[in-house]
Amino acid sequence: MADPMNAQELARVLQALLAARRAEAPRLNTIHAYVKNKVCDIYVPQSATAEYRKLVDQAKFNILPLLVSSVAQGLFVDGYRPSGATKNADVWGAVWQANRMDARQSGIHRTALQYGVGYAVGLPGDVLDKALPFVITPYSPRRLTALYDDPIHGEWPDYAIAVGIPRYKAGSVSPLDMVVTVMVLDDEYVYTVDLPAGVVGVPVDGVDPLPFEGLAIDTQHVQVRRHGLGVCPVVRYLESYDDLDDGPQGVVYPFIPAQRRLNQTTFGLLMAQQHAVFRQRWVTGMAIPEDEDGNPYEPWNAAVNRIWHAESPDTKFGDFEETSLDGYLNSRDKDLLYIASARQIPPHTLVVGNAVSNVSAEALAALEAGHQLDIGEHKSAFGEAHEQLLRLGALAIGDTKTWEDTSAQVVWRDTTPRSLAQIADALGKLATQLDIPPRALWQMIPGVTEQDIQRWETLAGERDALGELGTLLAAPPAGAEDPEVIPDAEPAGTESDPALSAAGAPGS
């Protein structure tokens, strides 16, 4: 068993982790700001009116969250089974269900899709003073940074740092003197220490945080606990494995330029709608009346039930043609179609103009094909991480067999949009024509959970038992013999068989 790091070693590791955290912070903060609709990127002059600023705020036509939701809503892990098994492994109930991961898995999926990477920390309960034997804590990359020997292919990190929420330092005089609790993990220990918030912080709006060079650690304020798992207990969820050079960047970052175009087009649409969509009228050849003080005033109040007239024969009336909004709407639709095609999102999901109308069910299925392939690829990437996390949980609870089983797989819920009648017909044909046991097809019904299957198996077992009981009650009592059948007496005058007569004749 290795000894824990001393103060100097911990300080060097902290510096490396904080440097990596600051290096990736600009990209992560940009993604977060765009997804949360905090950025519009439309020029606002200092002399802009309140009306102008209001239109800028209304021009945020944010579709980036939809890029995440369209994939995340098709990802739901429903079980974890060893190879060749039909039941979930024990670690499923002891670790996954106990940590409420049925609901919390969605946060990991969305984080990884949004930023390109997400994390889950798994520690024995005695390390965290929790009642559970193994505690899973999901993290965003904005709060956790991990260092790998091989950033692309590494399975377990060498070190990781999890950052808490800034809080006021107890006993501090200045309200700006805030601290952050950070947790450093390696393959044997967990180190918990409070650091100044200015050191842990990342660059925001051009303001650099405090330097961490020469960072000193007071060993009296470091809490060290041994987890004893033999690996740094951090599982990385990669959005995909498509780039072996720099790693994934998520589904949001590549489409930020398209989001900027959408905002700019929407702003132009709002400006035209506000100022140029109404017909402007003009009049020439007429003197404008003046009041007693010589100030001109408009002679008419325009209304739909009023008529304008002038006494001078040289007066002419006219109007300026209104600005058409079709160009702005078409431009926005083209950007949406580009995003839909590049992200393999069905165009009817974005409701793009008249892109989809009066199409058959087969055509809709064809439009969904690319999207389902995209979801399938993410299932493969996230599935490996879920399996890694569950194996780590098995190691923590002492189930070495599951820890060593690298062939076990998670079971994904089928979220493909299909009608129940179509599914029932297909499954029925599989059972009758291919002689597949019907119970083996239950898990292929969309929306069915592992709990549903277990309840059905219980009910099916009860029904089989009742059938056997009915058969048993219908049978004759045990020990009862069939009644002896006595043949009818031969009618008088009938001729008997000569052989029988000879054999049975007396004295023969």
Image (tube, grey):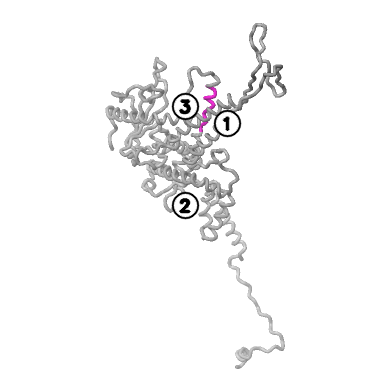
Q: Which residue is identified by label 3?
A: 41
Q: CA distance from mark 2 to mark 3?
A: 53 Å
Residue 102 visible to the viewer: no
Query: Residue 6: image x %, image y %?
Result: 28, 29
**What amino acid type should be assigned to the residue bearing mark 3?**
Asp
Secondary element at tag 1: loop
| Mark 2 in CB contact with mark 1 (< 8 angstroms) | no
Residue occupying image coordinates x 60% and y 70%: 481
Q: Which residue is identified by label 2?
A: 86
Secondary element at tag 3: loop
Residue 325: numbered disc: 1
- Foreground residue, 389 or 458? 389
| Magenta stretch: includes residue 158 | no
Q: CA distance from mark 1 to mark 3?
A: 22 Å
Query: Residue 300: image x %, image y %?
Result: 68, 17
Q: Along the horizontal axis of the image, is 90 left or right of 295?
A: left
Residue 16 visible to the viewer: yes
Secondary element at tag 2: loop
Query: Residue 66: image x %, image y %?
Result: 51, 36
Mark 2 or mark 3, earlier in chain: 3
Q: Along the horizontal axis of the image, is 467 left or right of 16?
A: right
